[in-house]
Image (spheres, helix red, strand yellow):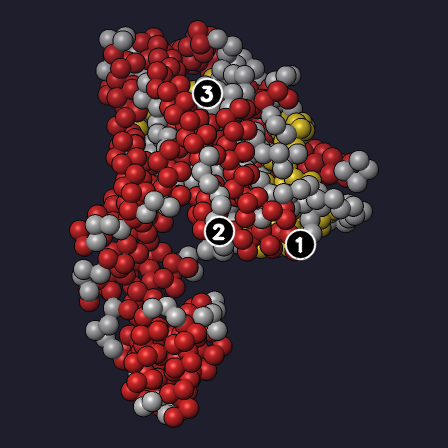
Amino acid sequence: MNIGEWLRQGLAHLEQGELEQAAARFDAVLQMVPDEPEVLLLAAMVAEQRGNFSQALSWLGRGLVRSPGDPRLHLKMGVVLKALKRVEPARERFLEAAELNPEDCEPHLQLGLLAQESGDDRGAVAHYQRALALAPDLPEAHFNLGCAWQSLGENASAESCFEQVLLVKKEHERAHYNLGIIRQGDGRNGQAVEDFATACRIRPGYAKARWKMLLDLPVLIEEEEQIEPLRERWRNGVLELMEAPLDTPEQIRESFEAASAVSHFYLNYHGQNDLEEQRLYGGLVTRTARAVFPQYADPVQRAIGARLKVGFISSFFYGHSIFKTHSRWITELDSSLFERFVYHTGGKEDGNSHYLRDRAEHYRWLPPSVPVADLIEILVADSLDVLIYTDLGMDGRLHPVAALNLAPVQCNGGGHPVTSGLDSIGYFLSSDLMEPKDAQGHYTEWLIRLPHLASCYPKPRVELARQPSGFESGRVNFVNLQSLFKLLPQHDELFSRIAAEVIGSRFFFIGISEAVNGMFMARLNRAFGRYGLDAGEYCRILPRMPQEEFFGLARCADVILDGIAWSGNNSSLEALAFDVPIVTLPGEMFRARHTYGILRRMGVEESIAFTPEQFVEKGVRLAEESAERRELSLRIRESKGVLYEDPEVPEALGHWLQSLTVA
């Protein structure tokens, strides 16, 4: 058989995915022409697809000795190096390929992927735009550009890119899925469900899209009457997914990817006891996670050592509220008694991340580009005694991880103040002052009441405050510092009732997006209209703002009106640093009692209401009685010191952890 026939057969096998046969044919050709670059490139392609990266690099290296100016060899070597996580050498090869063949879009696509995997979404945008300048109709370039814009929060640009993909390739299921994610986050739930359904039609086994289609919830509730039908639809969706077969490796893999990507975050903002819903969803995630990792289904039976190995895991160990509430749980534990492991699973690091890195014995940054399976194996390899999920429920990626038994003791750290519903999580670490007496009934975990506010909260840097853009002062400034999805429509009337008594007042809210802000404003128009008032005259929705402007907004407030179903914790601790009175109405659940506990800790309880009527009365009185407001501010100034840097909390956490060695 001549060389041409061997090559023809090898190419045919490669096209059919018959890699072993293709490799044999190309090897035979290389016996006859050992340094032919074209054949070396083909052999390297087969070796790469078989996962034999060292052999691929060897073939490519030989090819480049013979043909150093061949851009295809540089490009393929870059792809192999990228697969080996050798980022800088891969980047050099892609840049060389782009220089050798300026008209080829592929090196720019690869540079964009490399940038995205490294967390440089801005850089990725530039590379994808360059690729599209060379190949305007390339669907993958539009798709990848859309993903980069989405990561940057530029959803309008992302949506345009995904729509462009569909103009070129209508049956692109991932573009439909990502459009659904954007539209769901923007309050267009009807469209979102259609997008997810289309993705499922194109690829029936697309579990992520199916989970989203069945479990989709709106960011903002428009009418109180929506809540129960939405929850019923959601419960039925979970029950339907529980019946989905997990018989093949592909079904199990797809379901696990869905459990890692889909979150039921907005369910917890309906102002209800979610114990049974959390238990139901926990069962779904547990079923999926343990199908993939059956070896971690049973509790870990291992003796706990004298110096406990304690892990803390979160996607928010950076300049985020979780860092503020939980970082000193880590840094203030006695290092002679505890070996501390920090697992930062978020997509970005900053100086706050490095603060933990420099103080804990072990720090591991495991961003979303790290496969969940690798994350699990890292946790197992560290042989932890205790694993604390500081904010379980905020990042869906960690939910199936938490459903596994990876340490003898596993805890929910309460940063997302809702029970996990997982039988793998044994304890819920909460605040004694914020929990009601009968709180154990709200949790599937055993409730541990840490003293006071359960945080060793850093003092807010009040000197950084600056007035937010768009702030227009009224006669009296009422401010609500909560995300709009925490505010329920049945409580809107409290604002309008106060406005009816305090003419010329202003109510400030912090927005989410133009669409969601519009929906919230429509709610306010209805509530204010019932009192003959125009919400547009009283209410202002400010854009999302940096920390300095958030501080400035709190400083500009005369009175802060707390959220009802979901009370301020971080926001109240920061606002009180500016001595601003907060009117709060505690509810039944932990998440509705944060500010209540904070005010009790200070011993400044005059602005705590226990009925909606009292909430309105106290808001009006503080607005109209400036002397009383100043007196309350003075009392806050004198007593607020107890809120910050409370050493008793990490000390109590340490005592409780030590008690585990005795149990």
Question: How far is the residue under mark 3 from the one under mark 1?
Answer: 39 Å
Circle on res. 382: 1
Say few, some or many: other residues with alpha carbon within 10 Å of mark 3 (under 14 / 14 to 19 / 20 or more): some
**Relative to 513, 227 lies left or right:** right
Tag 1–tag 2 contact (CB < 8 Å): no
Amino acid at pointer 3: Gly
Q: Which residue is mark 3?
A: 271
Say few, some or many: other residues with alpha carbon within 10 Å of mark 2 (under 14 / 14 to 19 / 20 or more): few
Q: Residue at x 27, y 80 (%)?
A: 100
- Mark 1 residue element: loop
- Residue 592 horizontal/vertical position (percent): 51, 21
- Residue 296 horizontal/vertical position (percent): 63, 46
Q: Which residue is mark 2?
A: 249
Q: Earlier in the sequence, mark 3 or mark 1?
A: 3
Q: Earlier in the sequence, mark 2 or mark 3?
A: 2
Vertical order, 375 against 515 (above or below)? below
- Residue 144 horizontal/vertical position (percent): 30, 56
